[in-house]
Amino acid sequence: MSLVESVLEQLGIRHPVIQAPMAGVSTPRLVAEVCNAGGLGSLGLGASSIDDAVKQIRETRRLTDRPFNVNLFCHRPATKSEAREAAWLSHLTAEFHQFGVEPPASLKERYPTALGNDALLAMLLEERPAIVSFHFGLPDIGWVDALKRVGIVTMACATSLDEASAVEQAGIDIVVAQGAEAGGHRGVFDPSQDALIGTFALVRTLSQHTRLPIVAAGGIMDGEGIAAALRLGAAAVQMGTAFILCPESSASRAYRDELKSPRARYTAITSAISGRPARGISNRFHALESTGASTIPDYPIAYDAGKALHQAAAAQGNYEYAAHWAGQGAPLARELPAAILVQRIVEEWRNAEGALARDAVDDAGRG
């Protein structure tokens, strides 16, 4: 059995295509359509309450009987600093005033981490999704064993060899190798130590230094990208930006319009929106970071300011402060129903693999 076949069997899917868990964009309908088409759909639950997470899991189960993934955030709890938060709000005051509103008087921590959240673990053990994945780090000691005891497959994001080693030592089943090309939040454990390694360099390095199956993530938008990733040692790929334009996603009209526009050619990483580095279509926030980086509060406290500023601007038709996350492959995004997109991607991958096989035969014949 090949590495790809082994992972397909482990995940209970037909194709080595995983729809990335995009909090705020993934929906039960998107997840179900990807699963029903033979891929692995993923719910991004890092920003959800436990009650909302249960609702999304059960709604997805209503729409598909196939395995799906739920993703959780394992970031270190924010260190609250009233001085730094006040300085950041002061830095943003002129931006708020453009829209005739005052900045918030204070900021709150919007998204609690999974770390130390026993109620969240209890919910997972009760609902038993087929796959649980982790972003920003690793869960508490005991979580992985508890999930495995009830038959749940685990995955975790790594952006470097050191992180991948930690993932393997934690007993995680599959490592997601997230390259710097990827859209959305960097999964780096410690943002101050981010080496910004590209997807293919990371996949190839991990293939030589870890025994875990590897899922390649970042910049992969079509079947040709899948073929390249698998040749370098990946067993599957994770694609996020590729699915944003699907009608089943919850992306806003403004988000969709930007992703279809020439602006999609220009993405960059900023911490100014949320307090953690994330890649999105370049906007005003990217410029604001260059002049106020030292005052950005911890994730996710900074997100409270970012969302407030976006809301004020969007109310007047200005989307320069939106979190329009997108990877470097954004100009390749296609506006297709999710099931058709999966089918198209798989056909492209098979055609690419066939072309490589024919080239190898031709080379052997010429030799």
Image: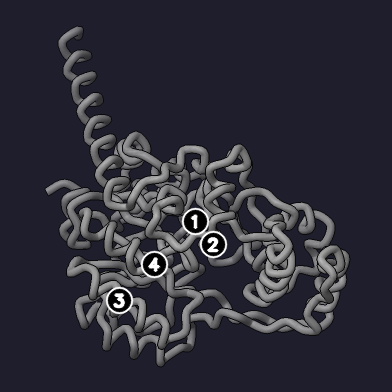
Query: Label 4: which residue?
Result: 27
Mark in the foreground, 4 or 2 = 4
Distance from disc 2 to disc 1, alpha carbons, whole Å, reads 6 Å
Residue 22 appears left or right of 97: left
First in residue order: circle 1 vs circle 4 = 4
In this view, the mark in front (1 or 4): 4
Q: How is the image coloured?
A: one colour
The mark nearer the N terminus, 2 or 3, is 3
Alpha carbon separation for disc pair 1 and 3: 32 Å
Q: Position of residue 317 (x, y in %)?
A: 70, 58
| Residue 59 disc label | 3
Q: Nearer the viewer, residue 247 or 155?
A: 247
Q: Residue, x 49% and y 56% (percent of image)?
A: 159
Q: Nearer the viewer, residue 162 or 138?
A: 138
Instruction: State which quarter of the image contains the C terminus.
Output: top left
When the figure is inspected, residue 306 is found, relative to residue 52, above or below; the finding is above
Q: Is residue 321 left or right of residue 337?
A: right
Mark 3 residue element: helix
Residue of label 1 = 159
Q: CA distance from mark 4 to mark 2?
A: 25 Å
Q: Earlier in the sequence, mark 1 or mark 3?
A: 3
Disc marking residue 188 = 2
- Between the residue at mark 4 and the residue at mark 3, the CA separation in whole angstroms equals 9 Å
Q: Is residue 58 left or right of residue 335?
A: left
**Residue 19 in picture, x, y percent from top left:** 36, 56
* First reached walking from the N terminus: tag 4 or tag 2: 4
Whether 200 is drawn above or below 187: the answer is above
Amino acid type shown at disc 1 = Thr
